[in-house]
Amino acid sequence: MLLSEDKVFDTLKNIKDPDLQKSIVETGGVREMKIKEDNVSLKIALARTGTAEQMQLQQQIVQAVKEAGAESVGLRFDTLGEEEVKQHGGSSQSQEEKTSLLSKENKTKFIAVTSGKGGVGKSTVSVNIATAMARAGKKVGIIDADIYGFSVPDMMGIDQRPTVKGETIYPVERFGVKVISMGFFVEDNAPVIWRGPMLGKMLNNFFNEVEWGELDYLILDLPPGTGDVALDIHTMLPECKELIVSTPHATAAFVAARAGAMAIKTNHEILGVIENMAYFESKLTGEKEYVFGQGGGERLTEELKTELLGQIPLGQPDIDEENFAPSVYDREHPIGAIYANIADRIIEKIGK
């Protein structure tokens, strides 16, 4: 049986606007609905968007509409007009103040991990530097700011979600690292359309609405390139430091130079370059093969007038079924030791 608009409307009657405590159908929040071969696309207006509760609501909608028979659910969000909010008993009262990572009193050091192009292992580097810093006794958080290509939870073997109490999100902790990711708020990889202003709002929430506690370092795994998210980070965090990840390949290094140039232009200090997939080391002979060529990392450090913090070979962590984390290297693993050295160097550089 084909899914009808009436059936979807009936399903949405059970979902309440978190601020107005009224059904999103009653508030007139269902702005658009399109059904094509059991694929439902919705535009929903709420009293306030970009909140922790919107993320929970997003999961509820996707789940409910799928239970009603939809194959997939696409969601966009909009904000109800002031008059509409008043009409349904809402007000624009300011929320209770949280300790924001963006406040002047906050002492957290921000480190953005960036690359010119995708596929250079930037998220693997972010995750392993964060865990290496935590092993060194530092209080560390990681924001998976790669809004479309979020992979940090999977890489760290995280299968639970953050808890949300009222307006506050509590991050998930693994290997001593507090983690927040867009991936936590998307049901079964449902497509969510985030445009420029909304992306900025989303990132703001990750800083303002998450209860991070005390942090020494916050690692930001940025999307590749120099798009909206990178620009938002540059604007929001003028004191942010940057790590540039590249491979030895000349093209990757050339493209990474653009990300570095943007950092320099916005006065972000570049901590250094990490050359990933630098070589393959044979377990049998110990010989190194430079599969992706050589020299990209060095050329990049010369161009950006910074240092090469480390060269990470191709490899894979030992998989522990009990404590599953497909991309995290143990301290004892040779590649884990390289990450530990890089983390120590970063801590030393920032401490100066």
Image (tube, rainbow, N blue to C red):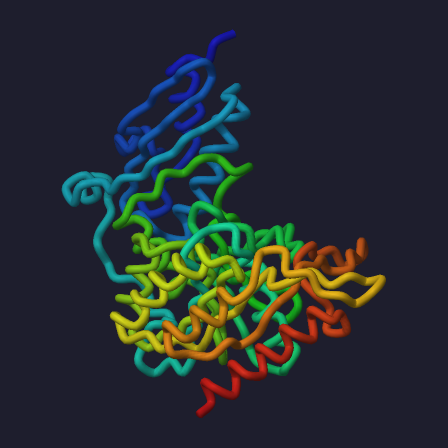
Residue 316 rendering spot, x and y as whole percentages: 71, 57
Residue 106 rendering spot, x and y as whole percentages: 38, 80
Quadrant where the image shows the C terminus: bottom left
**Measuring 57% from the left and 70% from the top, which residue is drawn there?**
130
Residue 109 placement, left or right of 20: right
Q: In this view, does 134 lie above or below 35?
A: below
Residue 207 rendering spot, x and y as whole percentages: 39, 65
**Measuring 48% from the left and 9% from the top, which residue is drawn there?**
2
- Residue 133 or residue 46, whichever sits in front: 133
Residue 165 visible here: no
Quadrant in which residue 209 is drawn: bottom left
Give the residue at the far top of this rendering: 1
- Residue 16 or residue 312, whichever sits in front: 312
- Residue 174 or residue 119, whichever sits in front: 119
Q: Is residue 129 above or below residue 187?
A: below
Residue 161 rendering spot, x and y as whole percentages: 57, 52
Give the residue at the far left of this rendering: 83
Q: In this view, does 38 lie above or below 72?
A: above
Give the residue at the far right of this rendering: 284
Q: How many labels does the image show?
A: 0
**Measuring 81% from the left and 62% from the top, which residue is drawn there?**
283
Residue 309 visible here: yes
- Residue 167 or residue 305, whichever sits in front: 305
